[in-house]
Image: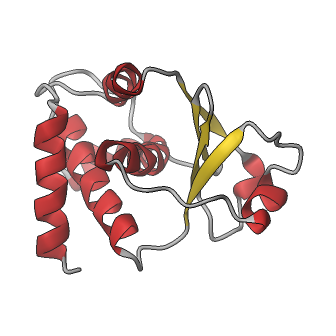
Amino acid sequence: MNYREARKIARRAEHGFGLPDDATLLYIQNKLEMQRGRPIIVDELPGMCGSELCGVWLICADRDIVLHATVKSSWHRQQIILHEFSHMILQHDIEEPTEDLVTAFLPDLGVEVLRALGRRSYTDDAEFTAETLADQLAMRIINSEVPSLPEPLAFRRVFG
């Protein structure tokens, strides 16, 4: 899949999701919770640091869990979460969790986890499309009139 195809799919998904101009990460999460009929828990998993994996979406019987690595920037954290939310918006088929993924990061995880999708690379179409949609959602949030959290290192003043 090339970038043009991924962008077309991502735009269609974004339009179908129906976000207002003043979207925020929390608004997207709340809308997904309403659509999916279940809570979405977002949390940091420090054990993910230093690995190829920086985000994972766990699909449980009664909730979704998005775990992300410890990051230095709120923008990076937002991008990881938006990537996982994009998989939800795109309704990607999720593979069964690999034993390596579960045992490496969540050794005490119970059988209530039905499926997992880990963010490792962008080599396949689903990952590439999810990252493309995450970029579009991030731009929507950046261009929103809703005040955001203070940016680390005065990013906007430096880069405009």
Residue 91 or residue 107, whichever sits in front:
91
Determine the residue located farthest toward the right in the rendered image.
108
Give the image location of residue 31, x and y in percent: 32, 23
Q: Is residue 84 left or right of residue 115?
A: left
Question: Quadrant of residue 65 in the image?
Answer: top right
Residue occupying the point 11% across, 28% down: 21
Give the image location of residue 112, x and y in percent: 74, 36
Q: Is residue 89 left or right of residue 39?
A: left
Residue occupying the point 18% across, 75% down: 3
Quarter of the figure with the N terminus: bottom left
Residue 26 or residue 116, whichever sits in front:
116
Question: Quadrant of residue 157 in the image?
Answer: top left
Residue 100 or residue 48, whichever sits in front:
100
Give the image location of residue 59, x and y in percent: 58, 41
Q: Is residue 116 left or right of residue 98?
A: left
Please determine whether, in this image, residue 97 is positioned above or below residue 4.
Answer: above
Residue occupying the point 58% across, 28% down: 63
Please determine whether, in this image, residue 94 is positioned above or below residue 42.
Answer: below
Question: Quadrant of residue 93 in the image?
Answer: bottom left
Please determine whether, in this image, residue 130 is positioned above or below residue 151.
Answer: below
Q: Is residue 39 left or right of residue 124?
A: right
Q: How many marks?
A: 0
